[in-house]
């Protein structure tokens, strides 16, 4: 596969024969005799192998007719349910947007005559619109419904339109299937190499695990009520196998140590005895495909950066793509912090059809994230106290003389309840900000009261151990430190609103409802080392950035990263930015 390795040491550019990426491959899931789930990337070279039940399409090329007109297929090869082809999806979204605009103009024009809707409108959309216009809803309410619907589907339409027109206008016999669109609420284009309907595809690659859902139920032959639970009663994350025989070693999957020149990984059996799984082959194929697509789109980046990620996937992928392209990857360019949280103002949201109730929910959620981050900071001294004295607190029996012991998390909850009561008694009840902050940061700590054991006994036991083995003065100073932190952050809130600087807990974009995510901003910042280096920032001024992320759903993560970059480089052209993702999620599981 390796044709040539360029001799320069920095950066080393690797040339690879890209004919290998033409192979039509699909993802296969299977249940093993031992009950485990296995994932493989097959080598079947037919157009139907990765549609429908496989939940991900890893094919690279196809004919124009296949890409434009094929539908998802079931296991028996028949069209799946109400699935639509690319062409049907494009026309359906186009008709819906036109219909909503017609209704707005009809209402604004005084509702004169009959509101004629497009003939190719989906029946479900037509029924919904007719229900609105035949109801007693006010003009403003109907207009808001339509605006909100347009906002909801315009990014999908944009993606479908760009991909549809690229395929339709191609003169090639073999056409690449990659998806293009515009990141919502930006002017920046994104490219998705593959598509999926189940995030378990990404989870299997990144973590060697899958989440239980309807797809796993069908595979395991169970119903939702039979799903396996963990010790806390939550749905258990299931371990999987690769290729029915390989136990995933994710750390090794994404390791770049001792990699032989010319190879992306050590899993050829050359270092560490691992096998080169079809999953690893897929990742190599994806990197090759990315290089092909970037050339096809005529985008030559100067730097590769990636959205912060909880997995090693982004760093691993970008390092390999960097080697492939011979372009610098700056692995710590962005930091995953909630910093000075901002979001679209209410007028912007209202203009897009969101109701005042929606706006209030969104703003409160953003504020609560700020409070939760502050809560973690405030409770950190007590958390540290419990774990530093784990030898004292770790053997408290749930029932007298029972072998089952309380966890340190239970002990922490207990002490936080005591701290909560103490602080509530000592703050000014008229100080609403401080009162709200305290109640918020301890609002979930009353769960001990709801458990089926004697919570009073645990309070007494913890208190006795503090008095006899640690000292009440030590604990009182700890409470004083906690109260001082409450006061400190309460004053910050009063002075600066919710634009606080905190970075203790990682923020996940999925904390927000999907409809709100595109309106967030400034949740990621450029690393301080780059912000404070004027010479470096000047070097980036007119540079072309390729921004990578694992996958795209609402597009909010990429949007926030773009915001951060454009804020620091206000003269940067959107044409100098391009986003690349491994897979696009068209919802589903």
Image (cartoon, helix red, strand yellow):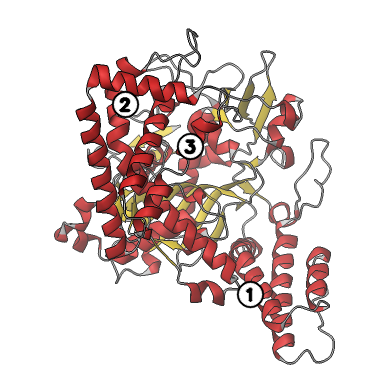
Q: CA distance from mark 2 to mark 3?
A: 18 Å
| Pair 2/1: label in front | 2
- 325 to the left or right of 59: left
| Pair 1/3: label in front | 3
Q: Helix or strand or loop: what does disc 3 sit on? A: helix
Where residue 85 appears, x then y in whole percent? Answer: 74, 55
Q: Which residue is mark 2?
A: 386
Residues at discs 2 and 3 in contact (Cβ within 8 Å): no
Q: CA distance from mark 2 to mark 1?
A: 52 Å
Q: Helix or strand or loop: what does disc 1 sit on? A: helix
Between 223 and 242, the one lying in front of the other is 223
- 246 to the left or right of 138: left
Q: Which residue is mark 3?
A: 446
- 73 to the left or right of 548: right
Figure check: 26 above or below 428: above
Mark 2 / mark 3, whichever is N-terminal: 2
Where residue 563 appears, x then y in whole percent? Answer: 38, 63
Q: Helix or strand or loop: what does disc 2 sit on? A: helix
| Pair 2/3: label in front | 3
- Name the disc covering residue 147, or none: 1
Please identify the quarter of the rendering in which residue 417 is found: top left
At label 1, counting other C-alpha atoms closer than 10 Å, the crowd grade (few under 14, some 14-19, many 20 or more) is many
Between 332 and 328, the one lying in front of the other is 332
Point 46% across, 15% down: residue: 405
């Amino acid at each position: 596969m390796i044709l040539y390795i360029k001799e320069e040491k920095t950066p080393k550019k690797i040339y690879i024969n890209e004919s290998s990426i033409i192979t039509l491959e699909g993802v296969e899931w299977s249940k093993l005799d031992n009950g485990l789930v296995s994932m493989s990337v097959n080598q079947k070279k037919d157009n139907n192998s990765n549609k429908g039940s496989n939940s991900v399409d890893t094919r690279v090329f196809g004919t124009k007719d296949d890409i434009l007109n094929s539908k998802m297929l079931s296991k028996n090869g028949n069209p799946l349910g109400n699935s639509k082809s690319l062409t049907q999806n494009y026309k359906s979204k186009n008709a819906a947007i036109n219909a909503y605009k017609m209704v707005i103009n009809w209402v604004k024009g005084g509702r004169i005559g009959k509101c004629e809707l497009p003939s190719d409108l989906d029946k479900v959309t037509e029924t919904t619109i007719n229900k609105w216009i035949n109801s007693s809803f006010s003009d403003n309410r109907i207009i808001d419904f339509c605006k909100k619907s347009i906002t909801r589907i315009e990014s999908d339409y944009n993606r479908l339109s760009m991909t549809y027109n690229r395929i339709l206008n191609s003169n090639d016999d073999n056409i690449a299937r990659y998806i293009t669109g515009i990141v919502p609420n930006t002017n920046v284009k994104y490219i998705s190499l593959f598509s999926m309907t189940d995030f378990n595809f990404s989870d299997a690659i990144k973590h060697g695990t899958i989440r239980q859902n309807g797809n796993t139920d069908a595979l395991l032959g169970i119903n939702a009520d039979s799903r396996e639970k963990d010790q806390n009663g939550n749905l258990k994350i299931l371990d999987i196998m690769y290729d029915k025989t390989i136990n995933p070693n994710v750390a090794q999957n994404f390791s770049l140590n001792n990699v032989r020149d010319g190879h992306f990984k050590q899993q050829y059996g050359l270092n560490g005895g691992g096998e080169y799984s079809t999953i690893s082959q897929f990742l190599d194929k994806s990197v090759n495909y990315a290089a092909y697509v970037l050339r096809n789109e005529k985008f030559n980046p100067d730097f590769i950066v990636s959205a912060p990620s909880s997995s090693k996937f982004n760093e691993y992928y970008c390092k390999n793509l960097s080697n492939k392209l011979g372009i610098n990857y700056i692995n710590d360019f962005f930091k995953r912090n909630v910093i000075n949280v901002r979001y679209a103002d209410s007028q912007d949201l209202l203009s897009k059809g969101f109701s005042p109730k929606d706006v209030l929910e969104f703003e409160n959620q953003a504020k609560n994230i700020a409070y939760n981050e502050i809560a973690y900071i405030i409770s950190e001294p007590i958390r540290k106290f419990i774990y530093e004295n784990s030898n004292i607190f770790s053997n408290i029996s749930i029932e007298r003389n029972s072998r089952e012991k309380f966890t340190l998390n239970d002990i922490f909850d207990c002490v936080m309840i005591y701290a909560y009561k103490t602080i509530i008694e000592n703050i000014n009840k008229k100080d609403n900000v401080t009162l709200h902050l305290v109640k918020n940061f301890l609002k979930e700590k009353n769960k001990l009261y709801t458990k089926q054991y004697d919570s009073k006994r645990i309070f007494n036991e913890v208190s006795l151990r503090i008095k006899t083995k640690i000292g009440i003065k030590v604990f009182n100073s700890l409470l004083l430190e906690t109260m001082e932190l409450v006061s400190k952050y309460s004053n910050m809130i009063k002075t600066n609103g919710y634009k606080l600087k905190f970075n203790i807990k990682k923020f996940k974009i999925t904390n927000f409802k999907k409809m709100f995510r595109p309106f967030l901003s400034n949740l990621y910042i450029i690393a301080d080392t780059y912000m404070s280096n004027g010479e470096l920032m000047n070097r980036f001024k007119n540079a072309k950035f390729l921004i990578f992320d694992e996958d795209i759903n609402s597009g909010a993560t990429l949007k926030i990263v773009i915001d951060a970059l454009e804020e620091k480089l206000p003269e940067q052209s959107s044409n100098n930015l391009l986003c690349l993702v491994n897979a696009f999620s068209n919802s589903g599981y």
